Amino acid sequence: MAFPVQTLTQLRPILVGFRKSAGLTQAQLAARLGVTQQSYAQLEANPSAVSIERLFKVLNTLGVRMTLALGTQDASVASADPAPDADAAPAVRQPAASKRKPDAARGTTAAKKPARPAAGAARKRPATATAGKPRVSKREDW
């Protein structure tokens, strides 16, 4: 049976359905994938955020084969987004002619130069790093 997927939000119910039709719990499928149940639960909750490689691993473990098919483009989408003309040059923005009056003519004063810090002023420097606990990655590499 074919399950056409046109948006990423459709992946979650499809993954849940395939897992349940295989008679597997999240923990059982996670064990087959070599990850924790929590990691698989995150993937199943938001499959649009995972890599295609991880998605393929899940689908292969479930025995699901993915087929891509070229569909016809919707007529409303095709008319709203016409194909660019190959001979058309890209639009170039022309600078506008300056219509501003000089500062004296406008009755304003010229902008002041920003104040410079004193010659002896020291710049802030980041504190030196101290040795702490080594970081342990919470992400599983699968």
Image: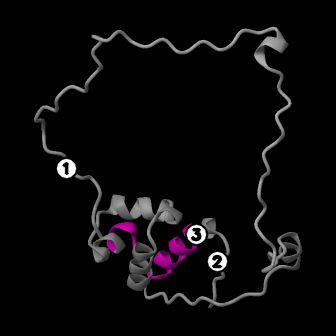
Q: What's the CA distance linking mark 2 and mark 1?
A: 37 Å
Q: Which mark is residue 118?
A: none
- Mark 2 or mark 3, whichever is nearer to me: 2
Task: Name the residue type under label 1.
Answer: Val
Which of the image's four quarters has the N terminus? bottom right
Q: Position of residue 76 (x, y in %)?
A: 88, 74
Q: Position of residue 5 (x, y in %)?
A: 64, 77
Task: Name the residue type under label 3.
Answer: Pro
Q: Answer with mark 2 or mark 1, whichever residue precedes in sequence.
A: 2
Residue positioned 65% across, 90% down in the render = 69
Q: Answer with mark 3 or mark 1, whichever residue precedes in sequence.
A: 3
Callout 2 environment at 10 Å: few (<14), some (14 to 19), or many (20+)? few
The residue pinned by badge 2 equals: 5
Q: What's the CA distance linking mark 2 and mark 3?
A: 11 Å
What predominant SS class does the magenta segment belong to? Answer: helix
The residue pinned by badge 3 equals: 13
The residue pinned by badge 1 equals: 136
Residue positioned 47% across, 65% down in the render = 44
51 left or right of 91 in image:
left
